[in-house]
Image (spheres, coloured by chain):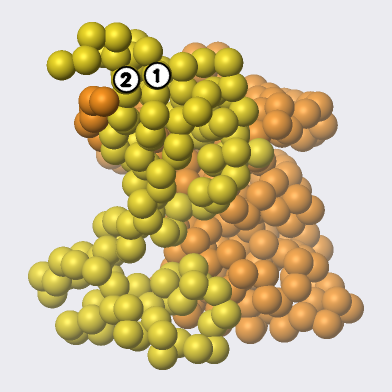
Chain colours: A orange, B yellow
Amino acid sequence: MHVIDMGHDVYKANDKVAEKNKKKLDKYQVFSVNVMGAIGSGKTTLIEEAIRQLKDKYKIAVIAGDVVAEMDSSRFRKLDVPTIPINTGKECHLDAKLVEKALDEIDLSNTDLLIIENVGNLICPVDFKLGEHLRVVIVSVTEGDDIILKHPMIFKTSDLAVINKVDIAHAVDVDAEKMRDDILSLKPNVPVILTSKHDWESLETWISFIELGVKEAQNR
Amino acid sequence: MHELSIACEIFEQVMSTAKEHGATEVKHVTLQMGRLSHTNPEQLSFCFNVLADESIAKDADLIVEMIPPSLECECGYKGAVDEKKIRENCEFESELLAYAAVMECPVCGKPAQLTGGRELIIKSIEIETENQD
């Protein structure tokens, strides 16, 4: 019997590809956002709003991850931005290799902002970096106010947290402020934004956060 | 399903290493898994065995060693999380949450950077070869 040392780290293999993706994006001064969150948290809607407001100022491309079908990507295409759908099949997250492949189909020299909509899931995307500059987690009040403490790692590893659909918090008997406190107890100082698609001011905060990143990338 | 894609990666890596070393059978595969990685050892083992069904690894045992989280702090501390503090944290029900919540430096108390505990490493394999030494 022989023992063979391997020392192969499965996640690090993904991280290496993610680093490569990030370098490629940096070369073209593209700011990339990885949008994570559960099914129905409002990822697609918040991305659509950002695209609507920013597409005249910046060149935007989208990678839309879905298990099957192309419903989300067709919504982005309607806004007239280049969109690459990724169907993961049975997989519950995007990984760096899938994004690497999608990047080949995007004209990066003609892109300022790349938005990556991850598959709807609060668990699996945590372990897989994609090469993004900003990791965003979107959670809605409809998921219940214990959702954050049930999924601590996605909040620990995100650079921005969005609590969405706050206009209906009362109807679903949820305290959005408690959700904010829970996020901050897991990751003090992480920016937390409360949003509703019916509240323009809250959407402006979300959009300006992304715009800030694009401007920084262009000045690098 | 998360575990199947990871099991595929493990299976491919194990088989290529086994082949390089002229293996006739893979007896054991030892993995190191961070306690904060979102991977379930039992599901992973099940998926691996399904994939290995018609290969030289069909009877292989998947041994999983769990790795506790480790931290690095701006005060200079490098090391494990404070396990005692986790046990005190009884209001948190799950172990994962307890770990995530107490990722603060056991020396100065500031929130610390997580440096380990999320890895998934194929540490080693034990194989049989035709020409035993």
Q: Which residue is mark 1?
A: B25
- Horizontally, is A173 left or right of A155 in the view? right
* Image-based side of A95 in relation to A73, left or right: left
Could you tell me if the residues under marks 2 and 1 are in contact, i.e. CB atoms within 8 Å? yes
Q: CA distance from mark 2 to mark 1?
A: 5 Å
Question: B26 or A59: which is nearer to us?
Answer: B26
Q: Chain of mark 2?
A: B
Quadrant, the N terminus of chain A: top left
Marks 2 and 1 share the same chain: yes
Identify the residue position indicated by label 2 in the image: B128
Residue placed furthest toward the right = A171
| SS of the residue under disc 1 | strand
Position of residue A201 measured from the top left corner of the image (x, y, whole percent): 67, 66
Dot 1, crowdedness within 10 Å: few (<14), some or many (≥20)? Answer: many
Residue plotted at (59% across, 53% down): A123
Query: Of B56 and A9, which appears nearest the observer?
Result: B56
Q: Position of residue B38 (x, y in %)?
A: 52, 52
> Looking at the rendering, which quadrant does residue A170 occupy?
bottom right
- Disc count in the image? 2
Q: Answer whether residue A180 is visible to the viewer in this image.
A: no
Q: Is residue B57 visible?
A: yes
Residue nearest the viewer, comparing A90 with A115: A90
